[in-house]
Image (cartoon, rainbow, N blue to C red):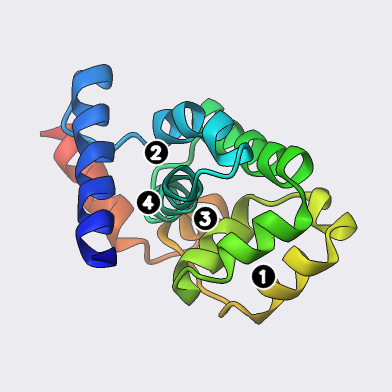
């Protein structure tokens, strides 16, 4: 059952990204902004969508601006307005790599949220593709591949 929901959510993100951005790329920013209000109200699918969107975005090697800021705002808004306990309880049900991705977007808000802070501290330290780009680490094969394709 969960697998079917996860596939449906991933497909919805992909379709939303294609339909709204007029490209074949996933659009985790729009997934976040469309799910945030429902997530705050306790909708478990919306909460999961926010977390999966974070995972999708950190696996994109392109350094972002507005999209990454929007996801950060959404995560922090869910934590602040939804509350520490609901955020932590929803997050701890996710896979470790998704929790690590959410940690990437949490700012100082997590310092005032001890339950969430405990969940994200247990997540593995993962160097996501966007980390390589932001820190300008070499080699960055996925970014190099994207850049090469863009030049063609």
- Dot placed on the residue nearer the N-terminal end, 2 or 4: 2
Would residue 148 be found to the left or right of residue 143 on screen? Answer: left
Real-space CA distance between mark 2 and mark 3, rounded to the nearest whole angstrom: 23 Å
Name the residue that disc number 1 marks. 120
Name the residue that disc number 4 marks. 56
Name the residue that disc number 3 marks. 136
SS class, disc 4: helix
Would residue 41 be found to the left or right of residue 28 on screen? Answer: right
Q: Position of residue 94 (x, y in %)?
A: 47, 68
- Dot placed on the residue nearer the N-terminal end, 3 or 1: 1
In the image, 58 versus 4, the foreground residue is: 4
Real-space CA distance between mark 1 and mark 2, rounded to the nearest whole angstrom: 20 Å
Residue sitting at x 34%, y 34%: 27
In the image, 113 versus 137, the foreground residue is: 113
Name the residue that disc number 2 marks. 28
Specify the label residue 106 is tagged with.
Answer: none
Determine which quarter of the picture holds residue 152: top left
In the image, 49 versus 44, the foreground residue is: 44
Q: Which quadrant of the rendered structure holds the N terminus?
A: bottom left
């Amino acid at each position: 059952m969960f697998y079917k929901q996860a596939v449906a959510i991933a497909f919805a993100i992909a379709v939303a990204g294609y339909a709204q951005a007029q490209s074949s790329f996933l659009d985790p920013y729009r997934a976040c902004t469309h799910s945030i209000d429902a997530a705050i109200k306790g909708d478990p699918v919306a909460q999961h969508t926010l977390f999966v969107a974070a995972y999708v975005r950190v696996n994109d090697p392109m350094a972002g601006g507005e999209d990454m800021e929007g996801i950060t705002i959404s995560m922090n808004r869910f934590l602040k307005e939804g509350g520490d306990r609901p955020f932590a309880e929803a997050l701890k049900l996710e896979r470790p790599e998704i929790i690590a991705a959410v940690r990437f977007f949490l700012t100082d808000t997590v310092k005032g949220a001890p339950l969430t802070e405990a969940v994200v501290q247990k997540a593995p330290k993962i160097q996501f593709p966007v980390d390589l780009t932001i820190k300008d680490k070499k080699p960055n094969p996925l970014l190099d591949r994207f850049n090469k394709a863009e030049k063609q």
